[in-house]
Amino acid sequence: MPHLGIDIGGSSAKVALLDDAARVLFRSLITLADRADDPNSNRAVRVDVIAKAIAAAAAEAGVAPASVTVATPGIVDARHRRVVSLPGKLAGLEGVDWTEALAAHDPRHATPITVLNDGHAALLGEARLGAARGARDVAMLTLGTGVGGGVMIDGRLLEGRHRRAGHLGHISLDPYGAPSVFPTPGSLEWHMGDAYAAARTDGRYASNEAIFAGVRRGESAAVGAWARMMRALAVGIASIVNAFDCERVVLGGGLLAAGSLVLEPLERQLDEVEWRPDGIRVEVVPATLGRFAGSVGAAVYGRDANGRREGGTS
């Protein structure tokens, strides 16, 4: 039976369909508009996208998906039916029960919709089919507009009592620093997230891409800003490793487009700040599934949950 994963973001929806053996049957990318000024439109557009993705999956597989999982930013509820906290992102989606919304949109769609945090979904995708394959204790950081993430311990996704675990972008690097969208001061997200590039550079660079371009041009302000980002990332990774004793850390998100300009200075910084008992260093590797990690991971989550319900194995 096929399993559908849909990763809902501000500018796009990524769709992946997997079979019971976790093989990818198809993937697609749908461009969206984030209408912060019109929450009702935001919600309606994304419900329609989910309905169309289910129909396309059924047409591709010849049968309706056995599970449908939506990955989205935010904290999900205990039943994995809706997002209960989504500050500063995707207006209109907080509190939406996707199963009810889809049934109201089109009564033909009776499949329950499971909701999963997008960082958790990305980690599951990389763990099953990507850069974390074969590892049991893994952390992942997604470096984009903000900083998301997830943690896997002994092969199991760590969600925590209130599904807040794995929000690694909100660990604090500076107790007196500025907050991001959460009250935690001096977070890793503030030091690395694209949304805070202007604040970190006194308005000189509007985005991480602009800082990166400045580095390419040899601008001293950009070189300094980039070096501070790499230092913050290394300290964040070292702290995460100290907390969870990971065997591997996976880095994903748009910042990794800079390639060696991230990985090489990061390695030098980790040589300085990482605690390495017995000389053991953590593996830090780039993600391999790209923009589809979240949708693949969402489908994996649905497949595994469906297998547990039916008494099968994952």
Image (cartoon, rainbow, N blue to C red):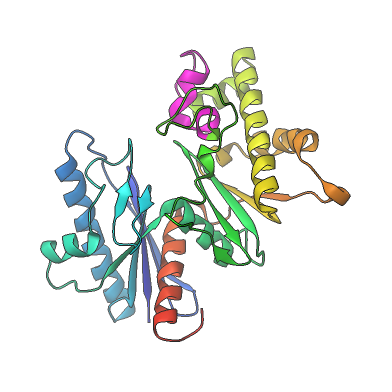
Residue 205 in the magenta stretch? The answer is yes
Residue 80, x across and y down, in percent: 34, 62
Please state the extent of the stretch shown in magenta in the rendering: 189-206
Q: Is residue 217 visible?
A: no
Q: Quadrant of the N terminus?
A: bottom left
Q: Is residue 219 visible?
A: yes
Residue 96, x across and y down, in percent: 22, 53
Q: Residue furthest right?
A: 278
Residue 125 lies, with reference to residue 199, above or below; the image says below
Residue 170 lies, with reference to residue 8, above or below; the image says above
Number of numbered discs visible in the structure rendering: 0
Front residue of this view, candidates 110 and 164: 164
Residue 176 in the magenta stretch? The answer is no
Give the main secondary structure, helix, strand or loop, of the magenta stretch: helix
* Residue under the image location 14 percent in, 73 percent down: 108
| Side of 123 relative to 220 (left or right) | left
* Residue under the image location 42 percent in, 34 percent down: 182
* Residue under the image location 25 percent in, 73 percent down: 111
Residue 6, x across and y down, in percent: 35, 60
Query: Residue 239 occupies which quadrant of the picture?
Result: top right
